[in-house]
Image: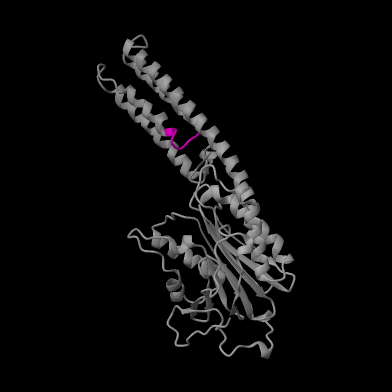
């Protein structure tokens, strides 16, 4: 068992553990000494039960039983000095102390056994969750990647949010981030369905609309098999944002299926990349009913993309205020993906008071400048003019759009 990072079976090896053990021992010594010097008709031996009861809060069954035995021995000593072991009152106190110490030790033993079982189950669950999520590497082609997953359920490492990166067949990277309706462990099946379809289609599909169509077909075909329809009778759907980021060109594309828009960080400017051709979430319409359109934007060397799920922007403060992600990021100094993610994480927890009501995922993608080779004919008149509808920090350069 683990208490504050200390295994109870190795408690005596830790300085803090040795300090805690002295507390019940000191209580036994003090109670015994005071009782021995009290009049014969005053009985304090019953207070010795405090020692094993206190020990069980931080120690395992062996140490608890040892303290219990020490308390019983102390009561025997008190009885010997105060009228002998034949005294009815002392016999009752000794028997009561033995019974209570035994019960406390048994409770401690059961707790430790359940703790070991929980540890094994948690280890298996974390391994399975890592396999399902399969976090992206820190470097993918010319991209530097950092990610963060915050589950609403403390025992889960992933839940209803998903993200991934896969290499395409055309010297580029495909990116997906999504959010299953629902949260925690119950939504893992739907998240794994989308991730599996994405990893299969990212390399096989030539265009981004083809990839999203493949995701929709997979969801429509298999949603009933993986969704928790027994306990959740509501509509099941998944918001998804997919991106195509070429290695050697700055023109990137995205398809947004009901997902929060990404943020593009260019120097000291932050843009919200709203979609001009949004699509419904996966699972809402039949695959043949939706024609997916792409939005293009410029993603240059040293630019950074911040992708997130609605668990971030819908996180509330104790006063009920939503977290203003775009405005907060615009106030941060330029930094590496890992540093930006840490700053957002700390700021988000500070805003919410350390508690999130929903799963939340963030992914930061930075393009390194050395790998970008953009022909002059592909350089647009305004370098950040495609599919952008909002400047967060009040730049005087108005965005334009191209279809």
Seen as rendered, the residue at the extreme front is: 289
Query: Is residue 69 found left or right of 118 in the rendered image?
Result: left
Segment colored magenta: 55-60
Does residue 144 appear anywhere in the picture?
yes
Q: Is residue 329 shown above or below 384? A: above
Query: Where residue 31 sits in the image (x, y, percent)?
Result: 33, 28
Q: Nearer the viewer, residue 351 or 19?
A: 351
Q: Nearer the viewer, residue 387 or 24?
A: 387
At x 57%, y 86%, the residue is 383
Does the stretch in magenta take in 59? yes
Query: Where residue 378 sits in the image (x, y, percent)?
Result: 66, 87
Magenta stretch prevailing secondary structure: loop
For residue 61, above or below residue 280: above
Which residue is depicted at the point 44% across and 78% down?
Answer: 392
Q: Is residue 24 left or right of residue 292?
A: left
Place of residue 87 in the rendered image (x, y in percent of width and height, measured from the top left): 33, 10
Tell which of 208 and 289 is nearer to you.
289
Residue 61 showing in the rendered view: no
- Residue 216 in the image: state x and y as whole percent: 63, 60
Residue 151 counted in the magenta span: no
Tally the marks: 0
Horizontal placement of 341 versus 36: left or right?
Answer: right
Quarter of the figure with the C terminus: bottom right
């Amino acid at each position: 068992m683990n208490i504050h990072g200390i295994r109870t079976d190795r408690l005596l090896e830790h300085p803090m553990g040795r300090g805690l053990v002295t507390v019940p021992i000191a209580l036994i010594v003090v109670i015994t000494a005071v009782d021995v010097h009290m009049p014969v008709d005053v009985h304090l031996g019953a207070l010795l039960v405090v020692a094993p009861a206190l020990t069980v809060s931080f120690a395992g069954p062996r140490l608890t039983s040892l303290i219990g035995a020490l308390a019983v021995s102390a009561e025997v000593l008190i009885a010997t000095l105060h009228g002998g072991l034949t005294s009815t009152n002392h016999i009752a106190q000794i028997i009561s102390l033995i019974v209570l110490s035994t019960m406390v030790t048994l409770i401690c033993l059961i707790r430790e056994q359940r703790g070991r079982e929980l540890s094994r189950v948690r280890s298996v669950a974390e391994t399975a969750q890592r396999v399902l999520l399969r976090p992206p590497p820190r470097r993918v082609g010319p991209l530097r990647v950092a990610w963060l997953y915050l589950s609403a359920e403390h025992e889960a490492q992933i839940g209803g949010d998903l993200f991934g990166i896969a290499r395409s067949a055309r010297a580029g990277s495909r990116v997906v981030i999504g959010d299953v309706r629902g949260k925690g462990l119950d939504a893992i099946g739907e998240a794994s369905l989308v991730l599996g379809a994405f990893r299969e289609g990212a390399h096989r599909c030539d265009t981004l609309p083809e990839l999203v169509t493949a995701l929709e077909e997979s969801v429509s075909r298999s949603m009933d098999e993986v969704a928790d329809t027994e306990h959740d009778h509501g509509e099941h759907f998944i918001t998804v944002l997919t991106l195509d980021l070429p290695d050697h060109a700055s023109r990137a594309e995205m398809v947004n299926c009901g997902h929060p828009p990404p943020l593009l960080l260019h120097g000291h400017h932050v843009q919200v990349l709203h979609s001009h051709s949004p699509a419904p979430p996966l699972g809402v319409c039949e695959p043949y009913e939706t024609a997916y359109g792409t939005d293009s934007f410029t993603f240059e060397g040293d630019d950074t993309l911040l992708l997130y799920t609605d668990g971030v922007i819908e996180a509330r403060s104790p006063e009920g205020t939503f977290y203003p992600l775009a405005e907060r990021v615009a106030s941060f100094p330029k930094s590496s993906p890992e540093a930006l993610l840490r700053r957002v994480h700390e700021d988000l927890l500070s805003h919410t008071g350390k508690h999130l009501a929903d799963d939340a995922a963030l992914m930061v993608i930075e393009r390194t400048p050395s790998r970008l080779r953009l022909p002059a004919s592909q350089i647009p008149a305004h370098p950040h003019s495609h599919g952008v509808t909002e400047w967060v920090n009040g730049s005087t350069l108005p965005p334009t759009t191209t279809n």
